[in-house]
Image (cartoon, rainbow, N blue to C red):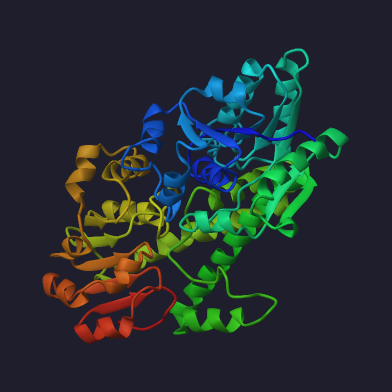
């Protein structure tokens, strides 16, 4: 069985950075190098003040302990490849925007480029590990590319090791994972490579939490897991619409059905919609896979999960307009939260982007506050959401504020779009005093105590609750 002494991770993003930082921390005998062509990102990982390019609770502490000891960040991709025994490929796999499969298929350009680079540079045998979320049988394409371009006496073994991290709890998830999944070809060489990676994880993960499966099962399991979780969110959000129409309370409904041991309580919290880099992208991958296999009904089934999520966002923004006397033109709306969820700076597929775009189309004025998202990221996301609108026009309608209190000042309504803990402890009495009256709060994350806010004087609308204002 090959022994892993040096690991290289290609890609210093939300998966590669935290994952390999934890591997370095837990395996001080292994040299871990994280490489990326983005020099600015590498500089941030190496910054003296530890102003890392990713916000994740606990990540800075991990990097502080391991960086410079056996954890290194570099833009010298070739050197990292050449020296490693095992290479994680952890690059971006966005949904294709053009060509065959546009809107659903994964764009594997970065995966292919990384694979070709490995083949071009490597002069010794390597274990190459898919860490990116990829469509089923991507490993076959990687294997063909590597074998077609490999040098004499150089062998490549391909493994699939998908991540199951939740942003905001990624370090906790890495320290104590529900499972570590490793897929390999069921050949003697494939199984040996699989055991080599198992030995790395066994430094801190109990053996019964390490699952070894076939290569294709591993690839599909990642898509399936995210699809099932997203399905639960869309299901509870569909019920939230019924609750609002009938006067039922989604919290009570979710608690009731969550007590059923066959169902459980996780991912039954209604919201303005799910976001992030994984759920929508992975479901659309599953849709494209089903369509390519001529499984039309299966594709339609999974597509409806995304359709329901988009409906939930539109329904929430429409409720804001309808409640504010059917017009928000010229009215100021405070949007609290821009990240797709709390405890992350990630904005990919954030519900806030859709809400703000809808408010802009209604010619409202929007104040935004988020405790972690960089201002440049907000402007970039809003520009991408409204490509026909010049940034100067967007900035005439939208302001980015330095606090929740500032964002709410002179507003007609407050929209809670991200479940940041600090929004629970806002001085709502001061917020109310600084707002135009009547003052409205729209809670899209089931975060605030509606009765306490109503006692102050607010008109409160909570997602999934049918109270009349």
Q: Position of residue 5 (x, y in %)?
A: 65, 34
Q: Is residue 342 left or right of residue 224?
A: left
* Residue at the image position 67 percent from the left and 48 percent from the top: 201
Q: Position of residue 127 (x, y in %)?
A: 71, 31
Up/down of 402 relative to 99, above or below: below
Q: Nearer the viewer, residue 67 or 278?
A: 67
Q: Is residue 122 left or right of residue 309?
A: right
Q: Work out which quarter of the rendered image holds the C terminus and state it.
A: bottom left
* Residue at the image position 68 percent from the left and 79 percent from the top: 261
Work out whether residue 452 can be spotted. Answer: yes
Up/down of 238 relative to 311, above or below: below
Instruction: Please state the total of marks drawn on the protein image.
Output: 0
Q: Work out which quarter of the rendered image holds the N terminus and state it.
A: top right
Q: Using the rendered view, name the quadrant where residue 457 is placed.
A: bottom left
Q: Position of residue 326 (x, y in %)?
A: 27, 67
Q: Nearer the viewer, residue 366 or 149?
A: 149
Up/down of 413 relative to 111, above or below: below
Work out whether residue 364 can be spotted. Answer: no
Q: Using the rendered view, name the quadrant where residue 177 is placed.
A: bottom right
Q: Nearer the viewer, residue 313 or 410?
A: 410
Q: Is residue 453 left or right of residue 345?
A: left
| Furthest residue in direction top, as rendered | 152
Q: Position of residue 11 (x, y in %)?
A: 52, 34
Up/down of 105 relative to 445, above or below: above
* Residue at the image position 62 percent from the left and 40 percent from the top: 131
Q: Is residue 347 left or right of residue 280?
A: left
């Amino acid at each position: 069985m090959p022994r892993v002494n040096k690991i290289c991770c290609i890609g210093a993003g939300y998966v590669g950075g935290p994952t390999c930082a934890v591997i370095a921390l837990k395996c001080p005998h292994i040299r871990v190098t994280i490489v990326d062509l983005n020099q600015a990102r590498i500089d941030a990982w190496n910054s003296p003040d530890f102003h890392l390019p990713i916000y994740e609770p606990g990540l800075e502490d991990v990097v502080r302990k391991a960086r410079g000891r056996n954890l290194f960040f570099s833009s010298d991709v070739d050197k990292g490849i050449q020296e490693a025994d095992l290479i994680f490929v952890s690059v971006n796999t966005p949904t294709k925007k053009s060509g065959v499969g546009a809107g659903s298929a994964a764009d594997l350009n970065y995966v292919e480029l990384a694979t070709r680079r490995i083949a071009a540079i490597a002069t010794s045998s390597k274990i190459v590990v898919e860490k990116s979320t990829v469509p089923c049988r991507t490993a076959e394409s990687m294997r063909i590319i590597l074998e077609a371009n490999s040098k004499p006496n150089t062998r490549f073994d391909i493994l699939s090791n998908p991540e199951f991290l939740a942003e905001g709890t990624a370090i906790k998830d890495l320290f104590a994972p529900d499972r570590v999944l490793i897929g390999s070809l069921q050949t003697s060489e494939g199984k040996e490579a699989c055991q080599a990676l198992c030995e790395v994880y066994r430094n801190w993960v109990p053996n019964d939490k390490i699952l070894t499966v076939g290569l294709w099962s591993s690839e599909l399991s990642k898509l399936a897991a995210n699809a099932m979780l997203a399905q639960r969110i869309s299901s509870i959000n569909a019920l939230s619409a019924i609750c609002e129409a009938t006067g039922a309370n989604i919290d009570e409904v979710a608690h009731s059905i969550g007590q059923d041991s066959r169902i459980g309580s996780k991912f039954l919290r209604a919201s303005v919609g799910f976001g992030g880099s994984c759920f929508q992208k992975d479901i659309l991958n599953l849709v494209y896979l089903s369509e390519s296999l001529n499984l039309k009904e299966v594709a339609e089934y999974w597509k409806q999960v995304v359709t329901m999520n988009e409906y939930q966002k539109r329904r929430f923004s429409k409720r804001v307009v309808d409640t504010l006397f059917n017009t928000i033109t010229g009215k100021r709306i405070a949007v609290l939260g821009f990240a797709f969820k709390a405890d992350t700076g990630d904005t990919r597929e954030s519900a806030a982007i859709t809400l703000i775009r809808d408010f802009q189309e209604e010619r409202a004025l929007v104040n935004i506050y988020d405790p972690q998202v960089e201002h440049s990221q907000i402007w970039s996301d809003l520009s991408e959401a409204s490509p026909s609108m010049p940034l100067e026009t967007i900035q005439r309608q939208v302001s980015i504020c330095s606090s929740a209190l500032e964002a709410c000042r002179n507003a007609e309504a407050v929209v809670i779009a991200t479940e940041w803990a600090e929004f629970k402890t806002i001085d709502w009495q001061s917020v109310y005093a600084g707002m135009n009256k009547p003052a409205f709060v729209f809670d899209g994350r089931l975060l605030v105590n509606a009765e306490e806010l109503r006692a102050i004087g607010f008109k409160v609308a909570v997602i999934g609750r049918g109270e009349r204002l």
